[in-house]
Image: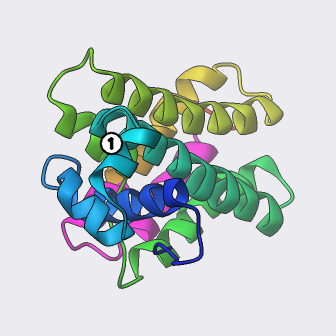
């Protein structure tokens, strides 16, 4: 998703920021680079976004739309019919993602860590986006009638984030390893 010349300036800015932030992180990308990539003037950026932080929050919202809603949730629901199958399909999707040349890790987690201020708007929005992923997992656990669906979803998200982190460090088998652990968990105390 790179900025297109025919898009409106706001959309070009958002697409450029999204690409740059997800690939390089928030702290290393300045507004000069964003406006250059978007092909707009700096004043145009500030006409649409009051600050780099506001642009980063818009990029997090775009990530949730593209990654969480249009990719993860939709693909899991299309690939598997049962909640258990959907939980495991998360790792099948991750395996495909981790093997892509443009694999960049978790923008939500990276933004949270890079903000260095747990009270910042960026950190708050990152936490909210991670929580929405966890709630999706919790919904699947509830469909399976797990007694502690919330506790399970927190553990499953740790497994997901651990796999993402391992893949960033070069372990392209991380999703398959996580799926094995997940299967053991689902057959253990959480089995319905």
In the rendered structure, the answer to whether residue 80 lies left or right of residue 126 reads right
Foreground of the two, 170 or 156:
170
The percent position of residue 144, horizontal first and vertical second, equals: 79, 36
Segment colored magenta: 163-188
- Whole-percent x, y for residue 1 in the image: 50, 73
Q: Main secondary structure of the magenta part?
A: helix
Residue 147 figure quarter: top right
At x 42%, y 40%, the residue is 47
Q: Is residue 18 magenta?
A: no
Quadrant housing the C terminus = top right
Query: Which residue is tagged 1?
Result: 109
Residue at the image point whose x is 47% and y is 41% from the top: 58
Q: Is residue 187 left or right of residue 84?
A: left
- Residue 119 position, x and y percent, is 27, 14
- State yes or no: residue 174 in magenta: yes
Check the image and report above or below for 87 versus 171: above
């Amino acid at each position: 998703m790179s900025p297109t010349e025919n898009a409106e300036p706001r959309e070009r800015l958002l697409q450029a920021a999204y690409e740059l932030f997800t690939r390089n992180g928030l702290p290393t990308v300045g507004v000069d680079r964003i406006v250059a990539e978007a092909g707009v003037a700096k004043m145009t950026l500030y006409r649409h976004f009051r600050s780099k932080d506001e642009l980063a929050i818009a990029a997090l919202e775009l990530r949730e739309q593209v990654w969480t809603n249009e990719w993860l949730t939709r693909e899991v629901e299309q690939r598997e019919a049962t909640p258990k199958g959907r939980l495991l399909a998360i790792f099948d999707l991750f395996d495909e993602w981790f093997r892509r040349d443009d694999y960049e890790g978790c923008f939500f987690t990276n933004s949270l860590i890079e903000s260095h201020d747990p009270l910042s708007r960026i950190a708050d929005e990152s936490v909210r986006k991670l929580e929405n992923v966890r709630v999706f997992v919790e919904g699947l656990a509830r469909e399976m009638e797990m007694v502690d669906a919330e506790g399970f979803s927190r553990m499953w998200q740790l497994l997901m984030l651990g796999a993402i982190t391992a893949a960033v460090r070069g372990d392209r088998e991380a999703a398959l390893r996580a799926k094995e652990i997940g299967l053991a968990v689902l057959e253990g105390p959480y089995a319905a």
